[in-house]
Amino acid sequence: MSNLHLYIANKNYSSWSFRPWLLMKVKGIEFDETLSPFDEPNHNKHFLEFSPSKKVPVLHLDGQIIWESLAICECLADLYPDLELWPTDRLARAKARSISTEMASGFSSLRSECPMNMRREHYAIPVSNGVRKDVERIENIWSECLEASGGPFLFGEFSIADAMFAPVVNRLQIYCLSEAPAVLEYRAAMQALPAWQEWEAASQAEPWIVEEDEA
Ligand SMILES: N[C@@H](CCC(=O)N[C@@H](CS)C(=O)NCC(=O)O)C(=O)O
């Protein structure tokens, strides 16, 4: 049993859960996980049993509770300095933090209109100008980072920034939102990760359907 316990929701839909889960798997951090399915009719009240914000993901560490996906990733970076969860170069690290925070706090049109859905067939839906602008900004961030680092991940090696953008890789694909070279190249690298494939296989085996996330 590990001293780290991650609480998550449905792998098919829970984009915030995906971020620290993927980071920990890719970096070989051992943890126990509890998947607690969404219960929309009851407003997910059962999340309060382990999450003070009533949201997932939540990390329990030796009796301490850490919530908010980016704060969880920061906590892991503190716990495991040798794993280099952020880029080692100071300027690259600052940029990785900037784009990760932009991801955590922004792209609201894309996040609300185009939910992550690992099982969904790939076809376009009508989207707002807000989504188009979000996609354009993401294409710019990814191409700039990949060009500067040489890839295959945003800062060369997989880092917290990649974990934060992982659900966007799915969204751009399933809603056919971009065929930009950087998007295709980055998607191939992310989807080749054994950890990505493990999450995707588990999501496909899930029985739950969340109607409001079936855009
Ligand atoms: N800002 C939070 C967002 C977490 C979040 O919204 N999680 C969703 C699941 S992906 C949730 O718990 N929703 C349940 C609810 O709002 O009742 C983070 O970064 O962790």
Image: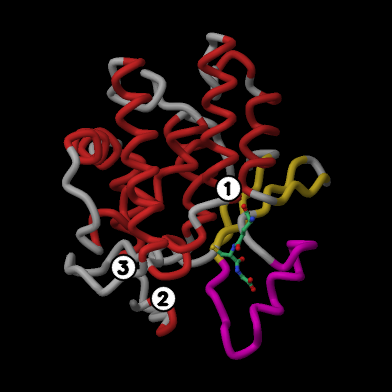
Disc ID at residue 205 = 3
From this view, report whether residue 189 is shown above or below residue 7.
above
Label 1 CB, ligand 1: below 8 Å?
yes
The amino acid on which the numbered mark 2 sits, given as a three-letter code, is Asp
Q: Residue at x 34, y 51 (%)?
A: 135
From this view, report whether residue 60 is shown above or below residue 98.
below
Left or right: residue 91 versus residue 169 is right
From this view, report whether residue 92 is shown above or below residue 107.
above
Disc ID at residue 104 = 1
Answer with mark 2 or mark 1, whichever residue precedes in sequence. Answer: 1
**Residue 1: image location, x then y, percent:** 63, 42
Which one is in front, 167 or 12? Answer: 167
Left or right: residue 36 versus residue 119 is right
The amino acid on which the numbered mark 1 sits, given as a three-letter code, is Ala
The quadrant holding residue 200 is bottom left
Residue pointed to by mark 2: 213
- Give the CA separation, mark 2 to mark 3: 17 Å
Q: Nearer the viewer, mark 3 or mark 1?
A: 1
Q: Residue at x 30, y 38 (%)?
A: 190
Q: Nearer the viewer, mark 2 or mark 1?
A: 1
